[in-house]
Image (cartoon, rainbow, N blue to C red):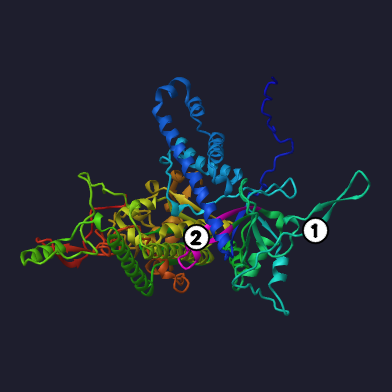
Amino acid sequence: MQAAQPRKFRGKNKAPKWTKPSDGLVSVMVLPLAVTDPADLARLDGLFGAMWSLKRVVQRDARAKVDAYWAAYHERERDGAKASRQRLGLSREALERCAYKHLEASGHLKHHASKALAMHIADEVWNGVSRHLFPDATGHRFGRPKVGNWHDFTRIPGRARSHTTANKWETFRLVGTLTGHAMAYTSGGQHTLMQPCRMPKPTVPEGRLPTGKMTAAGKPGMRKATWWDHTGPLAVVFAGGPDGSRGDLVLPVRIPPGAGQWERVQHFLSNPLTWHKVDLVRRRKASAPGGWVYEAHLMVLGPGYSSPAVRTMRDQAAQLDRIGGVDGNVSNLSVVSFPADLTTGKPVSTEVTLTDAEQRLIEKQAKKRRGRARALGRSRRATNTAQYGLSKKQTARAARRAEKGLGPKTVTVPGGARAARSDGVPKQAFRRDRLSANYREQRARQAEHAASIAEHRRHRARLVAREIIAAHGPVLVVEDCDIRTWYRLWGKRLSQTTPGMLISALKVECEAAGGRLVRASTWSTALSQHCLCGERVHKTLRDREHKCTACGLVGKRDLVSAALAAFVRFTDMDDPKTAYLDTTASKNAQITYAQALEEALRESTTPSPKPPRRSGRVAVPRQRREASALRTAGQRHRATPDETRPVRDHAGKPGPRTACSPQLTLW
């Protein structure tokens, strides 16, 4: 009997490995997919279902391996942590083999997913595991990897194309050309795209084409035409799983319409050699067939697109020889800048606050959000009546009917607490509740509304940051505060003003304009507790006005802190702890500018950056509660620093508002 041949492996690739360009700039363009065919929608739904099943099982195995790793502390001490991880299979390659094993063992997953997709899903799981096993630069670890839920699974990563071998792009690939797309959807001498609502799917080219090589008989070689020869409208093509029999999945691409979009499209799509990777993403939309809309996120090797106006603004900001300071507060963002040489120009101050119209719009949107949350709670209670008890009012009414000899009345929406065990855990998990079609539609609309709010909020932050850079220059200093801790006191107010998002947008714009946003430690500077003259002025968090008894300077607390941030110096720019306050320079500026500085510290001297129309809705916080919203949802237990706190009498009732200060200081 002949012995079995050992398994052969391909071995290492002998070709030079491709590396990302030295500049390392990558950008992403969102391409909407015009999917209207019910068969394609069903196939996409099956693809996402298969990939979710695969990711869930790999995450489950990774979680079990992580628990076993932390439990084997004797083995780690004896053999080392690396040996323990190798035995348990806690590595990128081991998780990839685990994903391959599950893909091969299941019969139905191979009809939808490929091994390349399984490898990338395993790589995503490993990224979460590595953040849990290995600490970051600050010494912190992330929590245990979580499985997640179905509705949060919205992205299938694609495999990057090969930039060393022609016509090698596995999984999702973008075919066609921008010129062919424009020629297909422009006619009659028009210069605008006229894309129909139901865009036709392009077909694979037919016929045979020359290969450019000669055969042994001396004749030109011929090959069959493929998708690589398609030069018509743009489309995303997926070959399907290894056991699939439905052919290629072709998804037409819809170019985003609107003014100024064509230049942006040309920036990303004019050069196919820069296309790197395509990820398939779905987004909740209740009005779409199936409740989802699909997008292709194209990663391009190169910088992102900036309009000519933005580029001009950044060039002008780079020429401003100014240095400024930023003070982020719960309800506003203050910026003050000075000329670098303190001999020309004058100080400039800006305050970013919410206008009265924005406040009213926020309250209106919040009220609508609470009403939607109550409707979702009523729908869940009406569909799962056995899981909820009667409210006090419903119980009293049932007792009155029993006293009168009347029969019990059916309660369609019980208003009591959910049936739970003695330790408070519900007897039936929320995920096992029956949900009506109306509930699912309203929940989809709620998720869609929250996503649009988040996008508008990010857009507003970018616009505000650009206007600040244009007025104060790209060199700014800000206190190194962890804004996440502020949410313990003022979570709802922070969701409205988003100071952390504004500071992050400022950092991006400073770097884009050739400058930098530097962070300074609060312990070594204590900006809110000092004056420009160098004296220490103690203020509680409630005191919003700066009054120095030494030099007599009076101004807004936030503007004074921002002005002091402009005079912070560093021993090491990358280490916030090396920051110190240059009181000599600040005192010199106070003497030089005198009255102009006092005016800048009392009120904003530049127009406050105005967000776009209807951008107030961006500040509505996302609703995460499944049950009905409480009646005290619009109240805060602790006032913000620029508000007064209600005083309660001996009976516990709120009295008239007075300007009393809480026992809380910044330092």
Residue lying at 49% horizontally and 62% vertically, measured from the top left: 290
SS at circle 2: strand
Q: Residue furthest right?
A: 218
Does the magenta stretch mainly form a helix, a strand or a loop? strand
- As drawn, the label of residue 99 is none
Q: Residue 110, relative to residue 267: is it above or below?
A: above
Q: Residue 393, relative to residue 504: is it above or below?
A: below
Q: Which residue is mark 2?
A: 283
- As drawn, the label of residue 207 is 1
Q: Position of residue 572 (x, y in %)?
A: 50, 44
Res 397 → quadrant: bottom left
Three-letter residue code for mark 2: Arg
Three-letter residue code for mark 1: Gly
Toward the viewer: 612 or 399? 399
Please tell me whether mark 1 or mark 2 is closer to you in this view. 1
SS at circle 1: loop
- What range is drawn magenta here? 276-296
Q: Position of residue 37 (x, y in %)?
A: 58, 64
Q: State how far apart marks 1 and 2 are (Cα).
A: 38 Å
